[in-house]
Image: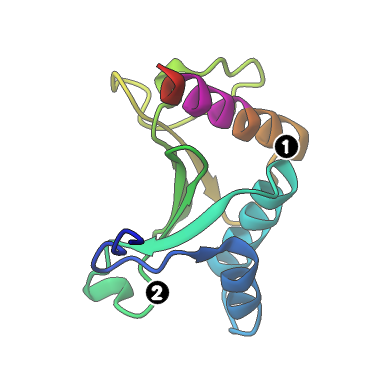
Amino acid sequence: MAPKAKTGATAKPAPRLSEQRKREDGDWREKTLARVRALILTADPEMVEERKWRKPSNAMAGVPVWSHHGIVCTGEKYKKVVKMTFAKGASLKDPSGLFNSSLAGGTRRAIDVAEGEELDAKALKALIRAAVALNKSSARG
């Protein structure tokens, strides 16, 4: 018997949700999140995107959560930034210095992207791949 999906989550392959989001008109935050999504899928085509944690400010969409052998990162839109939070970011090497938020925590690390700011695509893809590798090694044992 297949396991039940968690309430409030929509477990669909990321490309389907990506196509849905492309159809929506968006401001700079939506465009930035779409760019992040494209980079994540390029880095790991097997990534799964779910929408979780619906709240009044994003009741329809929820928060995108990208997973592969566990949560890799989330993407949230705030007034002044798009925040990518890596679930195990404190355990990842970040030689390019992408992490610029949530640096004091013992587990997570985040990247805040402000309007007009460009992400280092190569560095972000390397960080995504490293997070997936960490999840895979943790899953083994």
Q: Amino acid at mark 1?
A: Asp
72 lies left or right of 46: left
List the single residue furthest toward the front.
1
Q: What mark, if any, has residue 120 been given in the picture?
A: 1
Residue 53, position in %: x, y?
A: 27, 62
Magenta-colored span? 130-137
- The answer to which of 122 and 138 lies nearer the viewer is 138
Q: Which residue shows up at 57% across the image and 60% down it? A: 33
Q: Is residue 135 above or below residue 67?
A: above
Q: Nearer the viewer, residue 133 or 88?
A: 133
Q: CA distance from mark 2 to mark 1?
A: 26 Å
| Nearer the observer, 26 or 75 | 75
Quadrant where the image shows the N terminus = bottom left
Question: Vertical placement of 99 versus 27: above or below?
Answer: above
| Disc 2 packing (10 Å; few <14; some 14–19; many ≥20) | few
Circle 2 SS class: loop
Q: Quadrant of residue 120?
A: top right
Assess whether mark 1 and mark 2 are in contact (beta carbons under 8 angstroms): no
Asked whether, in this view, residue 14 is left or right of residue 135, the answer is: right
What percent of the width, then of the height, locates residue 79?
40, 62
Please tell me which residue is depicted at 37% across the width and 23% down the height of the picture. 103
| Residue 29 coordinates in the image, percent (x, y) | 54, 64
Q: Earlier in the sequence, mark 2 or mark 1?
A: 2
For residue 92, above or below residue 101: above
Q: Is residue 131 magenta?
A: yes
Label for residue 61? 2
Q: Nearer the viewer, residue 37 or 27?
A: 37
Q: Secondary structure at mark 1?
A: loop
